[in-house]
Amino acid sequence: MTTTATELLLIQKDDTWDQCNWIVPLSKALEGLTAEQAAWVPSSGGLSIWQLVNHMYYYNQRLLSRIQGKTPSGTPAENNESTFGDPGDSSDATGWSTLMEKTTQLAGQLRDQLASLEESDLEAPYMDTDGKWAHELARWILHDAYHAGQIVLLRRQQGSWNIIF
């Protein structure tokens, strides 16, 4: 039996979100994080986990809208850097919890939309570009995997990575 492009993208999406295979999936990288840990920024500088999640949420929400054939809601970000937002408030457990709930819900919605795509959808042009939807979706999955790896590294640096697979 032949594996379709949609099936391959679903395997990659699942492995990037919640299946522990070759990489640490994003849901595991975020598991058990407190607001304090999520807002932590290394002394050498850089981004917090909270900022990385904000960034992924922004782009994932826009991608979901586009897959659904809708114009993304809200004002587009001024630039990529602005999608990260502030480092987060270490005392805002409610804000962090809300972001985690929204991120989890969005991951499920994206997976459902991905599963509904036909091969012809994947071959269609992505927006007003020469690229195809299949190419854009493959890059999106790699984007989330990349940031999941950054989150694990930040957790290791702060001493909060105790999960063993």
Image: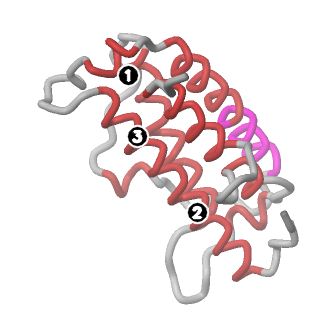
Query: Between disc 2 and disc 3, whose residue precedes?
Result: 2
Residue 78: in magenta span: no
Q: State whether residue 141 is above or below residue 7.
A: below
| Residue under numbered circle 1 | 72
Say which amino acid is labelled 2.
Answer: Pro
Front label number (2 vs 3): 3
State the residue in front, 135 or 89: 135
Left/right placement of residue 105 relative to residue 124 reads right
| Cα gap from disc 1 to disc 2, whole angstroms | 24 Å
Q: Closer to the observer: label 1 or label 2?
A: 1
Q: Quadrant of the N terminus?
A: top right
Q: Is residue 101 magenta?
A: yes
Q: Count residues near mark 3 (Cα–Cα under 10 Å), then give few for <14, some for 14-19, many for 20+.
A: some
* Quarter occupied by residue 34: bottom right
| Residue 69 placement (x, y as % from top left) | 36, 10
What's under tag 3, amino acid-wise?
Ala
Q: Main secondary structure of the magenta part?
A: helix
Name which residue lies at 51% across and 27% down. Answer: 3
Residue identifier under label 2: 87
- Highlighted magenta segment, given as a residue range: 93-103
Q: CA distance from mark 1 to mark 3?
A: 20 Å
Query: Residue 138 shows which numbered tag?
Result: 3
